[in-house]
Amino acid sequence: MPLFTFLISLFFFKENFKKVKVLSGLSIGFFGMYIFMNPQDSISKNLNLFFSLLIILSSIFYAFSANWVKTLKNKSSLELAFSSIAVATIICFLMILVSFSIQSDSVNLSITKLTFSSIVSATILGVLCTGLAIWVFFKLIEKESAIFASQSNYLIPCFGFLWSFIFLDERLTLNLFIGLIFIVLGAFLVNNK
């Protein structure tokens, strides 16, 4: 996503950067992400090309939206975050209705699996981990730039793995530490004034 954010801001939104510095920092960060993900493990799992392409397409759309948000000068970051979540909620609700209409058994199964703790957990994830994070992301774009804010996406898998290590007993490997070093170095190079 940070690479696509840079390319889209450069070609479509005509942002001015020190192109060599930003591109080298993004490349180092992307290389760190590549090491962090350990492609040797992924290849052996025979990943589906279709889903990989969907992930790339979603990063392109995410990068475009980050750049587009910067052009909305008359809206606050809180308004943009609320609007974004409201539209996503409507789309998700429609998808749930379509899913339930295709498989009527899934409605009963889904309702019976609901617990108080799952509702509380989903609410916390929605309000804090999504709502607050999107508001902060849009605030960063408003204050700095889409490229600056997009650097946080390099750290998402790092924190995801840290939480899985702490709570799910995942193992730490050398590629995770080396990848993290490259990711932080790349982010430093992009944002170093």
Image (cartoon, grey):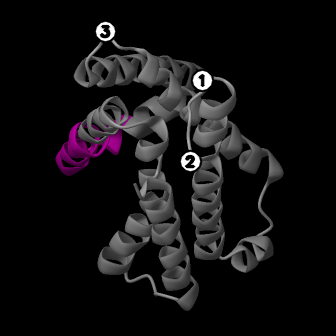
Element at label 2: helix
Front position in the image: 187 or 104: 187
Q: How far apart are marks 1 and 2 (CA)?
A: 15 Å
The reply to whether callout 2 and callout 3 are in contact (CB within 8 Å) is no
Q: For mark 1, what is the residue?
A: 13
Residue occupying image coordinates x 60% and y 23%: 13
Q: Residue furthest bottom?
A: 174
Instruction: Tell me which residue sits at (49%, 42%) in the image.
Output: 147
Q: Mark 3 points at which residue?
A: 74
Distance between mark 2 and mark 3 Cα atoms: 25 Å
Q: Which amino acid does label 2 sit on?
A: Pro
Query: Which image quadrant for residue 31?
Result: bottom right
Spot occupied by residue 26 in the image (x, y as percentages of width and height): 60, 57
Examine the rendered structure and indicate whether residue 143 appears above or below residue 68: below
Give the residue type that dot 1 points to: Phe
Q: Distance between the residues labelled 3 and 1?
A: 18 Å
Question: In front: 176, or 161?
Answer: 176
